[in-house]
Image (cartoon, grey):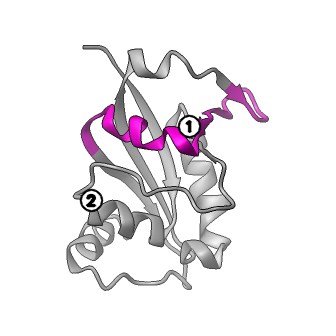
Amino acid sequence: METTRLYRPVGLKEMELIAETGYVSFPPRLDWQPIFYPVTNQKYAEQIAFEWNTVDEFSGFIGIVTAFEVKTAFLEKYEVQNVGDKNHNELWIPSEDLVDFNANIVDGIGVLNVHFTDRSLVTENIELRDKLNRFKK
């Protein structure tokens, strides 16, 4: 089975919801979020996490870079979308397809990096807090 590695920059609340699933799926989209957009490379995910999530109160002023493998055959129906620079590539997964997307994740969702700020909120989930704090410099 061939898989494709994807990345998703998230804030604290979304990471807490991922942790609640045992790190195997992404939470449903909110009403105002019609698409789920994983990105195709770590550099772009790091940029979003650092430049956007760390200055966003809703993200808890923390940017978390996740990575995961998805069955390539499932992804073939989605066209890669370029949204700026040559490495700003994403997949646009309609929110109604997220359950199927999650079912095609192989071996769970891992944390690759965490961007903290002086304002970063702290989770009450001790396991998640320990996982994130391993990235503090």
- Disc 2 marks a residue whose amino acid type is Thr
| Magenta segment | 81-108
Residue 134 lies within the magenta run: no
Within-10-Å neighbours for mark 1: few <14, some 14–19, many 20+ = many
Question: What is the quadrant of residue 3 in the picture?
Answer: top left
Residue that mark 1 sits on: 39
Answer whether labels 2 and 1 touch (C-beta < 8 Å).
no
Q: Is residue 59 above or below residue 50?
A: below
114 displayed left or right of 119: left
In the rendered image, the residue lying farthest to the front is 96
Q: Mark 2, mark 1: which one is toward the viewer?
A: 2
Residue at 63 percent across and 79 percent down: it is 57
x and y percentages locating residue 89 in the rendered image: 65, 31
**Residue 108 position by quadrant:** top left
Label 2 environment density (alpha carbons within 10 Å; few <14, some 14–19, many ≥20) = few
Q: Which residue is mark 2?
A: 21
Say which quadrant the N terminus sits in. Answer: top left
- Residue 137 visible from this viewpoint: no
- Counting from the top left corner in percent of width and height, residue 66 is at 41, 49
* Above-or-below relation of 11 to 124: above
Does the rendering let one see residue 132?
Answer: yes
Q: Residue at x 60, y 39 (%)?
A: 94
Nearer to the camera, 20 or 137:
20
The C terminus lies in which quarter of the figure?
bottom left
Identified at 26% across, 66% down, the residue is: 131
**Label 2 secondary element:** loop
Task: Say which of 35 and 15 sits in front.
Answer: 35
Q: Position of residue 135 (x, y in %)?
A: 34, 64
Q: What residue is shown at x 22% (from left), y 58% (from top)?
A: 22
Three-letter amino acid code of the residue under disc 1: Val
Relative vertical location of residue 35 with respect to residue 19 in this rendering, above or below: above
